[in-house]
Image (cartoon, rainbow, N blue to C red):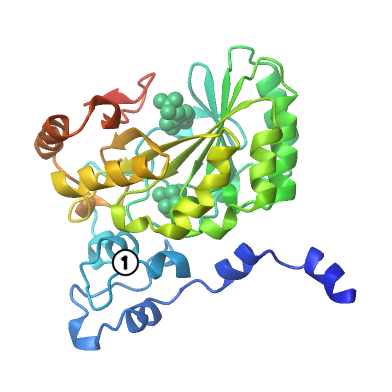
Amino acid sequence: MQTVSRLKTGPSPWQEELARSFRNIDQLLDYLQLDKGQRQPKPATGIQFPFRVTPAFAGKMRKGDMNDPLLRQVLPLTEEMKDQPGFSQNPVGDLEARATRGVLHKYRNRILLLETGACAINCRYCFRRNFPYSENQLGQASRQKAIAYLQSHSEVREVIISGGDPLMTANSGLGELVESISRIHHVERLRIHTRIPTVLPSRIDSELVRIMSRSRLKTVIVAHINHPNEIDQEVENALKPLLEAGIRLFNQAVLLKGINDSPEVLRELLETTFDIGINPYYLHLLDRATGTAHFEVTKEKALFLQEELRKNLPGYLLPRFVREIPGESYKTPL
Ligand SMILES: *Cc1c(COP(=O)(O)O)cnc(C)c1O
Ligand code: SF4
């Protein structure tokens, strides 16, 4: 009997899996059976934005391939240390959009909460890789103030819980947050922006599905999947209960040089996500955060890709190609 009660208070299976993440580049490259001689381009060490990859994500990388599209999303390269003109610490004007601690109010009737700065994996192209989370994440302490802000802004129809990755927060904390948002009458929709579905599918446990589905709010989850290889049976199984509970699933991806900047890869991504119940949302042009220049795809190439997708996919599988221009009142179509 004692074991049962200990299980209840101990870490969840997903937290245990997270604890087994790769935090050392050589360990991951060993696991991928890449000999020292094959490690080209040479990974960089000592970069401030830490290296971090879940076992679930690493398990979908091809062995022996330094150019694997999943590996390239997480592998630190020396290019990150070069300063590039036009790239900055505050690429999309998030700092100017802060309303109160942990709250970004950029667009008229949608509000974004920076629930936590933590993520299950660290994506090297991340637009918030330089974001000062320590002073700007919501956490328990500033929730009261954030909720008060929401209450006093009756124009807000939708609350986006983002980060970092909001699903890094344990169910108890997340449940309370959703509960307090749902008590605000003028809020109708709840949205979660998360990379969890393909990087830590075990996180989508039954309690999370309950939290998402029992709320009076219409609930939307926007996943972040960049490459079809991120999707496997485990991902499909994890999402099924959410779909069955009536939660709507969308995907946003970032256009990344050498990873998904080909018509074939994008088409496969859009078809595969659709197969598991996810509709396309945005395809973002890279936000120009310091250290990410080597991922940038030109506007001309993006237009070409958009055209190719239009020729090869039904209209409902076309994502909106957008980029974020600081100061604009919505994400700007290409
Ligand atoms: C992207 C973003 C949103 C959501 O924009 P949608 O076009 O509704 O998806 C809201 N707030 C902030 C700060 C954002 O960056
Ligand atoms: S999961 Fe999202 S927020 Fe976290 S590092 Fe990746 S892109 Fe950035």
Q: Is residue 129 visible?
A: no
Residue 184 is drawn in which quadrant? top right
Residue at the right extreme of this rendering: 1
In the rendered image, the quadrant that contains the N terminus is bottom right
Q: Position of residue 151 (x, y in %)?
A: 70, 19
Between 250 and 1, which is closer to the camera in this rendering? 1
Residue lying at the far top in this picture: please name it. Answer: 155
Residue 193, percent across and down?
49, 40
Q: Position of residue 125 (x, y in %)?
A: 32, 52
Q: Is residue 210 left or right of residue 221?
A: right
Res 58 quadrant in image: bottom left
**Tally of numbered discs:** 1
Residue 275 visible somewhere in the drawing: yes
Q: Nearer the viewer, residue 297 or 282?
A: 282
Question: Residue at 39% across / 70% down in the picture?
Answer: 59
Looking at the image, which residue is at 16% across and 29% down? 310
Query: For the view shown, which residue lies furthest in the bottom direction?
Result: 36
Give the answer, above or below, for where 124 lies relative to 269: below
Mark 1 residue element? loop
Residue 136: quarter of image: top right
Query: Please, is residue 14 above or below residue 139 in the view?
Result: below
Residue ID at (52%, 46%)? 240
In the picture, measured across the screen, residue 272 lies left or right of residue 16, that is left
Tell me the residue that label 1 is attached to: 75
* Residue sitting at x 39%, y 58%: 232
x, y percent for residue 172: 75, 48
Name the kind of residue labelled 1 in the image: Leu
Q: Quadrant of the C terminus?
A: top left
